[in-house]
Image (spheres, helix red, strand yellow):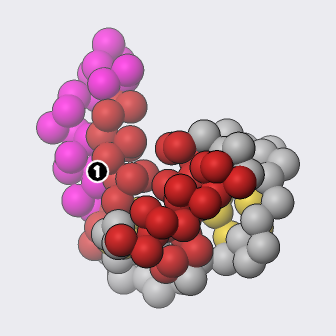
Amino acid sequence: MESRTDGVILWQVACEFVAASRKLERQGFRPEDAWARLAEFLTVFPLILPSAGMLHRARQLHIDSRMSLWDALIVAACLEAGVTVLFSEDIPGRAVPGLDFTNPFA
């Protein structure tokens, strides 16, 4: 796979990918498969780790914007990493200066 510079994988999203994959075990997608797929993704996109600044920004979003904690953590990580477009099907209609939301399934 070719490395890309137009996207990133957030730590929180990587963790959620592996955690959510357990719902696919009945279809034969095992935890080992999820970890292997994540490793493939990480050969293409860099992993963004959380920082203290991200946690502070998430606190502000959570309290001021009444965003869920988990959504606030992802949005804050995007802002800290300089991400301008977040692809998500479950953070619709949020207005966050500097960050556009795109539903990849719409």
Q: Main secondary structure of the magenta part?
A: helix
Q: Which image quarter holds the N terminus?
A: bottom left
Residue 46 in sight in this render: yes
Relative side of 77 to 30, left or right: right
Residue drawn at 37 percent across, 20 percent down: 23
Q: Determine whether 78 is above or below 65 in the image.
A: below
Compare residues 45 and 74 and report the one nearer the observer: 74
Query: From which residue to which does the magenta span run?
Result: 22-40
Q: Residues within 10 Å of mark 1 (few under 14, many from 20)?
A: few
Residue drawn at 54 percent across, 67 percent down: 57
The extreme left residue here reads: 32
Image mark count: 1
Check if residue 24 falls in the magenta segment.
Answer: yes
Q: Determine whether 29 is above or below 60 in the image.
A: above
Residue 34 placement: quadrant = top left
| Residue 5 percent location from the top left of the image | 47, 86
Q: Which image quarter holds the C terminus?
A: top right
Check if residue 86 falls in the magenta segment.
Answer: no
The residue that mark 1 highlights is 37
| Residue 15 percent location from the top left of the image | 32, 47
Relative side of 20 to 32, left or right: right
Relative side of 96 to 60, left or right: right
Residue 75 placement: quadrant = bottom right
Amino acid carrying label 1: it is: Arg
Residue 104 in sight in this render: no
Relative side of 94 to 45, left or right: right
Compare residues 6 and 48 and report the one nearer the observer: 48
Q: Determine whether 31 is above or below 87 in the image.
A: above
SS for callout 1? helix
Residue drawn at 64 percent across, 57 percent down: 61
| Residue 70 percent location from the top left of the image | 51, 44
| Residue 71 percent location from the top left of the image | 58, 47
